[in-house]
Image (cartoon, rainbow, N blue to C red):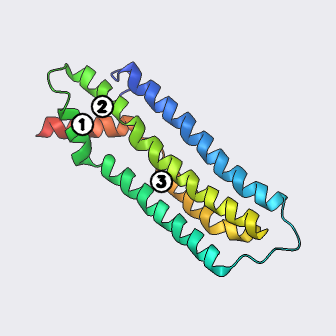
Amino acid sequence: MDRKNRAPSVSKNQSALKIVWSALLLAMFAYTAVVFVFKSPEAPDVRESVKAIFLLGGAVLGVISLLIYRFTLSEKSLRKKFLSTQGQEPGKRLEELSNRLLLPHVVPWGINETVVLLGFVLAFLSKNPQDMIPFSIIGIILHIYMYPRVEQLVERTKDSVQDA
């Protein structure tokens, strides 16, 4: 989107999302670092069933996060959000769309952080930092994939509606 022609709130929303995204990513790395710094040489016996439940929970949360992100930011969903603001001038409609993109970004990010937090808890219970690695990898990869692209989404929706 051309920086000169976009609404100021779109730029503010993009900046706000980048700040939240960065803060959550730093938290994920911090959780991972903490369990490696405070590891204990003697690990208590944490049953494999507990580890399996945590891994399954992390995987399910990762899939939920991805589905929410993909469906709420799909072209069909964005078009529906944009068209629901009919009657307003195009600039206001794009501004409203950018406001509506905040929640579909932040909710999956929180879920991504929860995946990493599950690994953090498991690693603390088992006193084995290696238990956290799959959770950190899943959470961080999902989070990087979900980097905020509000300006591109708004522009794509605008182009899609104009083509129709």
Q: Amino acid at mark 2?
A: Leu
Q: Quadrant of residue 52?
A: bottom right
Q: Residue furthest bottom?
A: 48
Counting from the top left corner in percent of width and height, residue 74 is at 29, 49
Residue shown at the point (51%, 52%) measured from the top left = 111
**Amino acid at dot 1:** Lys
What residue would you read off at disc 1? 81
Inspect the image, locate mark 3, and give the three-letter code of the amino acid beneath it: Tyr
Q: Is residue 96 above or below residue 69?
A: above
Residue 20 appears at what percent x and percent y? Answer: 55, 37
Residue 4 location, quadrant: top left
Asked whether residue 73 appears in the rendered view, the answer is no
Q: Which residue is mark 2?
A: 97
* x and y, in percent, of residue 62 in the image: 48, 61
Q: Please tell me whether mark 2 or mark 3 is closer to you in this view.
A: 2
- Tell which of 46 and 33 is nearer to you: 46
Left or right position of 70 against 32: left
The dot on residue 64 is none
- Callouts 3 and 1 close, C-beta under 8 Å: no
Q: Secondary structure at mark 2?
A: helix
